[in-house]
Image (spheres, rainbow, N blue to C red):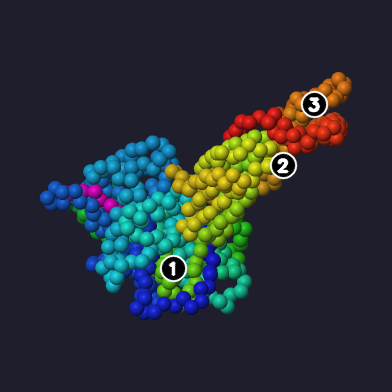
Amino acid sequence: MALLQIAEPGQSSNPHEHRIGIGIDLGTTNSLVATVRSGVPKILQDQHDHTLLPSIVHYGKDENGQAQVTVGHDAKASIATDPANTIVSVKRFMGRSKADIRFQHPYELVGSDQDMPTFVTAHGNQSPVEISAQILTALKNRADLHLEHEINGAVITVPAYFDEAQRQATRDAAKLAGLNVLRLLNEPTAAAIAYGLDQNSQIVEDQNFAIYDLGGGTFDMSILRFSKGVFEVLATGGHTAMGGDDIDRLLVKFLKTKFEIAELSNQQHAQLVQITKSAKETLTTEMQVDIQFDIEAQTFQTTLTQAELATVIQPVADRTLQVCQRVLRDAKLKVADVNAIILVGGSTRSMAIQDAVAKFFEQTPLCSINPDEVVALGAAITANQLVGNSKDGTLLLDVTPLSLGLETMGGLVERVIPRNSPIPVARKQEFTTYQDGQTAMLIHVVQGERDMVEHCRSLGKFELRGIPAMTAGAARIEVTFQVDADGLLNVSALETTSNVKANITIKPSYGLSSSDTERLLLEGFQHAEQDKQLRHLNELKVEAQRELEALKQALIQDQSLLEPSQQQSLHEAVAILEKTLQTDDASAIEQAVESLKVHSDAFAAMRMNQHIDHALKGTRLDDWSNSTNTSSSNQSKE
Ligand code: ADP
Ligand code: MG
């Protein structure tokens, strides 16, 4: 998604009017909150000077046996002691249906396949939205400790590939935590804003930025293009199961081999993971680290070097670079086209990762801002602008990640809002009825880049009823697509002669995975030519069907005008067209339409003459058109 800047002159605020906006990075592993103070974005710490809040929620009991929710560092220990009631990585469940959740987890989930499931906990069933709301509440409380008055609004970051359902779930969680969401912002865009890559006014040419985000359990690679004040996502890719946790796993395996340990209890294993993790983190600043691991009476000791760590990390680094290669290819860019690379995520603190990225992109990546803080800082800058504190008064807008449109006859997609349109956006398009006397219309809203509905994602359907019966094509139905600042879509339909209305707000109950979004985009590009042909074929069929329909109506009324031989050849031409319409042979259909035309044109001319004769004999022309209307079918077409 991208950003657009809108200059708002004279927006600088008086000090006493200072409003408070906070930026929140709601991460899979860790979450943070930041704000801008005296023009500088700052991470807000807790009472123990922690910047990161582990994204962990424990539903347990206090010392009096009362239900108690603990979040963050306080909940960490419960992962080992009470795993079923300790929810980690809840972000993976946000806006996803039970059927979408195919990864392993230790939780008992309930719910139907189509809906977001709930977790069975000691405090009853908890939805991913409620669990995320606990994390957001903890961050809000942390911010309240530091800030002089009430928070006016928050910007929350989400992965670039998050679809509407996942974004909606995030918004719902914020609402539950009592936060006023100013905007959801893409994580890579937030990182680019933190580095001020949108502020360099000397740059006139388009710039391409690569954002390499290796966190605890996920890897995300995005390529943004900054052009005319707008950040546009050119391509995204990643792995939903690759990050610091995998490095820890590999490192534990390495140490077990070194110590010649074959078996470990769960508890001992968890202990070794903790030791390993902190050793890994020490190695970002030290060349080597001493490790000591005790099991029962036995003590294992060794020294781990940066070089050893680099060897262990290599396979993870290699896999991320394969993704980088693919994402570059999707963006149709070469390494030399990338103007800057930003490192995001705690795992990019490892020298081995930094070296691998630098070698691949043939330049030194930007990492002067803490990689696990950079996203929250960018969100804080945006929040500060949105509450109206920023001196330059720039506003940042997102864009739609995939095209939005609706289904028309023949299963075709009519795109109403193209992909990468800056939001908020509203577009109006006129549609009409297909059949005579049609009184209802089904509006089917879809998302995707392909021409056929079946290749896109269905977002929702609604009916417009009570359209006055008219001839096909006479009704004027205005369909308005509106995407608000948070990416929520509202579609409304209005029949302008009668003023009947219907609308829908799209809050799909399940989401697309990042790979699904990528696939939809990629397929759109790959199938462009094939889609064009398919669209042509379908349009041809719809048009032919319409003509057949009209011809049949005319035959019911005026067949008697034709000689028996003329009737026969017309019926034969109709039969041939009907037969070719069963096939997908566009040129055969075109031919059949042509040969039918030869006969039907003559018939049309005869009918015209007859009606003129009638008119000359005193029958009013509108009688004729009225009779045509009432004789056509009056059913609703859905
Ligand atoms: P997420 O975005 O998934 O919430 P983070 O960006 O906070 O996660 O990254 C967390 C990961 O970063 C953990 O796996 C942690 O071990 C790793 N990490 C943190 N500090 C370091 C460091 N100094 N060296 C290597 N890895 C680190
Ligand atoms: Mg992150």
Amino acid type for the residue under numbered disc 3: Asp
At label 2, which amino acid type do we have?
His
First in sequence: mark 1 vs mark 2: 1
* Picture layout, residue 354 above or below residue 100: below
Which element type, helix, strand or loop, lies under badge 3? helix
The disc placed on residue 386 is 1
Question: To which quarter of the image does residue 638 belong?
Answer: top right
Mark nearer the viewer, 1 or 2: 1
Q: Looking at the picture, does residue 103 appear above or below residue 363?
A: above
Label 3 vs 2, first from the N-terminus: 2
Dominant secondary structure of the residues highlighted in magenta in the image: strand
Q: Nearer the viewer, residue 277 or 166?
A: 166
186 left or right of 337 in image = left
Q: How far apart are labels 1 and 3 at the CA level?
A: 68 Å
Q: 572 and 503: which one is in front?
A: 503
Q: Position of residue 318 (x, y in %)?
A: 49, 56
Region in magenta: 54-61
What crowding class fits label 3: few (fewer than 14 Cα within 10 Å), some (14-19), or many (20 or more)? Answer: some
Q: Which residue in the rendered view is the most extreme toward the front?
A: 618
Q: Report the residue marked by disc 3.
A: 558
Q: Secondary structure at mark 1?
A: helix
Marker disc for residue 536: 2
**Rendered residue at 70%/33% (across/down):** 629
Instruction: Check mark 3 vs ligand 2: CB closer than 8 Å? yes or no.
Output: no
Q: Is residue 114 magenta?
A: no
Instruction: Specify which label sits upstream in the sequence, 1 or 3.
Output: 1
- Tell me if residue 260 comes above or below residue 618 in the rendering: below
Q: Nearer the viewer, mark 3 or mark 2?
A: 3
